[in-house]
Structure formats: C-alpha cells, structure tokens
Image (cartoon, rainbow, N blue to C red):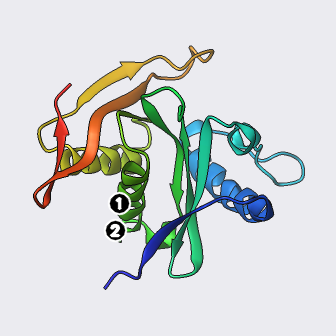
C-alpha cells in the first residue's frame, strides 16, 4: 500500500533541502541533455532561484509520509494557463504512484487550464505525463510541439494542454475538450 503523499509549500528554511533535491534532478536530466557538473561537482541551479523568488510561481516539496521525495514548481499563477515549470520525484519512488498523486494534488490546488511541457528524449517523463493527462482528461487533451526559446540546437518540447483537469462530476474526473 502506498504511504500518504502530500505537497507542502516550500518555505525559506527549505532552501538547502530544495537545492539538494535540485542536484538529483539535474543529475537525472544530464543523461538527456549532456550537461556536466562544474569544477566543484555541482550542477548549476539554473532557474531554481527564479522560481523561489517569482510571485507568479509556487513551489512545493513532495513528501511521502514525512520524507521529502521530490518537488514541483508551478508558474503562471496570475495569468492562465498554469504551467508545470519543474517536476521531480526521486528514483526510489518512481512508478509507485507518488508522482501521479502529487501531480493530481497540484491540479486540484490550482484549478484552471494547464500546460505541461516535457522533452521526448526523456521517455519516462513522456509516458508519465501522457498517461496522467489521459486519466485526468478522459475526454481528451491537446498536444503540440514548441521550439525551446533561445535554444535552436535542441529538439522542440512537447506541450500537453489540459483544460480544467480534475474537475469532478460524480466520482469521475473530467476535462473539457479544447
């Protein structure tokens, strides 16, 4: 049985924890992006400081029981569509349902239209987000390819466009067609 999965907002005291989880995240992505750590052995913090300071973003630590097992950042809080900016769960809990429960909690916490970008080069992420989109939007969702701004040398990202996921009718989640 899956232990309880919760999201808790990232607080200022959580910065060291989030930075350690970010290193694991960047390490995982290095397989697909070919990035290397710097001379000290650390990966760049990239957009993390922006997410932590931007009032139009919200960050969460994903916990299983009381243990941190990942994070999620949502952007475009002021003007929809909402966007999954970053989403990570540690390898030990992948394919256990933790990520799905955490993403569903994000959709329920921030209602409205959503955009979920990912890279096809990351097959685990592609399977995860398409499967979840089909579950939370059984009437369908829209998928498109978008160039990565300022990075013409890498393949375009895939974007899943979901309209009002997790709105329930009876006991079944529904999503309006786009």
Report the residue that reaches farthest toward the right: 40
Percent coordinates x, y for residue 112 in the rendering: 35, 37
Residue at image position (73%, 62%) is 20
What residue did someone put label 1 on? 100
Instruction: Answer yes or no: is residue 43 visible.
Output: yes
As drawn, 37 above or below 71: above
Residue at image position (59%, 78%) is 67
Q: Is residue 9 left or right of residue 168?
A: right
As drawn, 94 above or below 32: below
Residue at image position (80%, 52%) is 42
Percent coordinates x, y for residue 64 in the rendering: 49, 76
What residue did someone put label 2 on? 97
119 or 87: nearer the viewer: 87
Look at the numbered discs 1 and 2 and tell me whether their residues touch, using CB distance below 8 Å. Answer: yes
User: Within the image, what quadrant is residue 160 found in?
Assistant: top left
Q: Is residue 5 left or right of residue 88?
A: left
Percent coordinates x, y for residue 153 in the rendering: 57, 17
55 or 102: nearer the viewer: 55
Percent coordinates x, y for residue 100 in the rendering: 35, 60
């Amino acid at each position: 049985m899956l232990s309880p999965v919760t999201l808790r907002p990232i607080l200022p005291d959580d910065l060291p924890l989030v930075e350690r989880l970010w290193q694991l995240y960047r390490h995982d992505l290095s397989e697909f992006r070919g990035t290397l750590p710097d001379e000290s052995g650390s990966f760049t913090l990239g957009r993390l400081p922006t997410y932590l300071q931007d009032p139009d973003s919200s960050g969460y630590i994903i916990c299983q029981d009381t243990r941190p097992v990942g994070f999620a950042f949502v952007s475009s809080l002021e003007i929809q569509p909402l966007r999954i900016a970053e989403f990570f769960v540690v390898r030990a809990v992948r394919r256990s349902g933790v990520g799905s429960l955490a993403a569903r909690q994000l959709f329920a916490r921030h209602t409205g239209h959503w955009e979920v970008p990912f890279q096809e080069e990351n097959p685990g992420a592609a399977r995860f987000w398409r499967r979840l989109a089909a579950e939370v939007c059984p009437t369908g969702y829209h998928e498109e390819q978008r160039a990565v701004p300022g990075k013409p040398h890498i393949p375009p990202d895939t974007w899943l466009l979901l309209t009002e996921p997790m709105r329930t009718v009876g006991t079944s989640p529904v999503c309006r067609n786009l």
